[in-house]
Amino acid sequence: MTTPPAPSRIALVTGAGSGIGKACAQALLHEGWTVVHAGRTVASLDATIAQADAAQPGCASRAWAHAVDVGNQDSVNALFEAIRARHGRLDLLFNNAGIFPPGGTPDLLDGAAWRRSIDTNLNGAFYCLSAAFALMRAQSPQGGRIINNGSISAHAPRPNSIAYTTTKHAITGLTKSAALDGRAFDIAVGQIDIGNVASEMTERMAAGILQADGSIRPEARMDMSAVTETFMTMARLPLSANVLFTTVMATKMPFVGRG
């Protein structure tokens, strides 16, 4: 008698249309997960799925895209209702969606830019985490894993980054509190803090970026594979184990000793 294949685990990746979210969503797909790709534009999400399928034909059958504005709680709730209706459960949330608002000293950052950063980076992370908690707590078997994307900025700021840095420090508090509250329900919550991965967002760092001493200097970057390998190590763990915090960074970036 042939043993039926094990059911695919269900993952949700926010901000899956580009950068870190795209790479991690593709890594999950290639390892056999069913992956919900969430982001602002379905076209970019479909492109992520198509690229993954080109590398591993057939994996697109385990992927689907859903447009979401994580800063809007109604939009997030609609996403999770779709997941519940389609799969009945969620095993992994990668809380990755975020923005980096225009830089400037605090007196030059207007309230609208501040609110956009808070709404996307912090409120959006909470809305997704809250909805994931509700689903993971109610499903059978109970539990799941949530990985929040922090940042090197969760530890130390760059010049002119008060909004982004504030949200990433807050993500650390979100992770700690949720990890504690999740214990009773087998919900493991951890955080990955990433420094200078090679992507479109960090191209300016390779060219030269403002340092704490006022100088402009290029910074080392690392390959995206370092991030996906670290992320997948966290994702593969049994729920009895958790990486609460981990930092993966370009070895030669000026983080240790910054300032």
Image (cartoon, grey):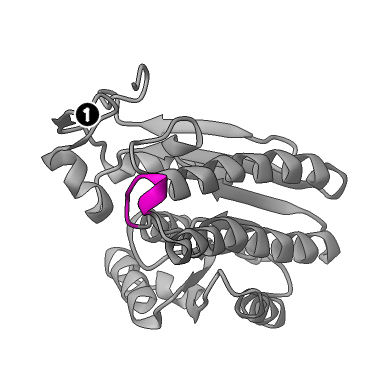
Q: Is residue 2 left or right of residue 221?
A: right
At x 54%, y 58%, the residue is: 118
Q: Is residue 56 left or right of residue 165?
A: left
Q: Is residue 82 visible?
A: yes
At x 55%, y 56%, the residue is: 95
Q: Secondary structure at mark 1?
A: loop
User: What residue is shown with label 1?
Assistant: 214
Residue 33 at what x, y percent from top left?
53, 61
Q: Is residue 142 left or right of residue 211?
A: right
Q: Is residue 10 visible?
A: no
Residue 211 in which image quadrant: top left
Q: Nearer the viewer, residue 247 or 27?
A: 247
Q: Quadrant of the N terminus?
A: bottom right
Q: Quadrant of the C terminus?
A: top left
Residue 97 at what x, y percent from top left?
48, 60
- What is the magenta range? 102-108
* For residue 109, above or below residue 41: above
